[in-house]
Amino acid sequence: MIVDRLEKPLSSKVDLSDERMFKKLFVGYFAPLCVFAQKYVGNFNDEDIVSSVFSNMYQKKLTFNSHDEFVFYLYKSVKNKCLDTLKADSRMTSRNQFYSEELEQDNLFNQIVENETLAETYREIQSLPTYSKRIIELSYFEGFSNQEIADELQLSLQTIKNYKRNAVASLKTALLKKILSFLFF
């Protein structure tokens, strides 16, 4: 029984500025209050909540006219701290969910833009003349070097470089026009 552990009658004055009394009360009530707090917040925050309540009471050096008054205040404080913690956790969960949904929408938007950009680039590549198109595909999609492309297509290295330079310039111009028309119209 709590009274036996504390060795104080229920009607005695409780002065938390008395360090010895505070330690006895802390030791005597910590575990039962953790069990009480678990009913509200589970095992996750119970010890932190009880410690916080005791710390707050100790800092304020509270004095109670009776042990009953102290016990009532203690349990009420733990309950209120539990409810505050639940509210804060709920707000944090709501904020996290909101930001998570926002990030998912941003991520989806970014994926759409990236995919559409690649699709438009691919369409522009398909509209290039045959040699230019093949050189771009071999170079950028299959990773061939200019010399390997020259060997594959049986053209000179300089011809490959010229086709590639002209194809890239043509792609840049076409894609830039599309981007500008998208942004301003």
Image (cartoon, rainbow, N blue to C red):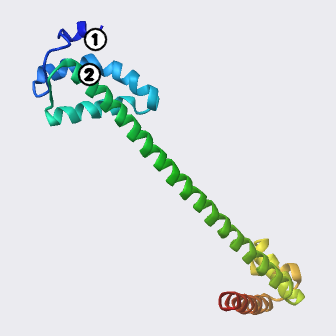
Q: Name the image quarter holding residue 75.
A: top left
Decide: marks 1, 2 in contact (CB < 8 A)?
yes
Quadrant of the image occupied by residue 25: top left
**Residue 154 location (% of width, % of height):** 88, 84
Q: Residue at x 63, y 60 (%)?
A: 104
> From where the camera sits, is residue 148 visible?
no
Task: Identify the residue at horizontal 64%, vertical 64% (top origin).
Answer: 105
Task: Give the mark toward the camera: 1 or 2.
Answer: 2
Comes first in the chain, label 1 or label 2: 1
Q: Is residue 66 above or below residue 183?
A: above
- Left or right: 158 with respect to 92? right
Comparing 131 with 62, the one in front is 62
Q: Callout 1 environment at 10 Å: few (<14), some (14 to 19), or many (20+)?
A: few
Q: Amino acid at mark 1?
A: Ile
The residue that disc 1 covers is: 2
| Front position in the image: 79 or 92 | 79
Q: What's the distance in space between the residues labelled 1 and 2, CA to CA?
A: 10 Å
**Residue 17: percent from left, percent from top:** 10, 28
SS class, disc 1: helix
Q: Amino acid at mark 2?
A: Val
Q: Nearer the viewer, residue 84 or 158?
A: 84
Instruction: Tell me the number on the disc at residue 71.
Output: 2
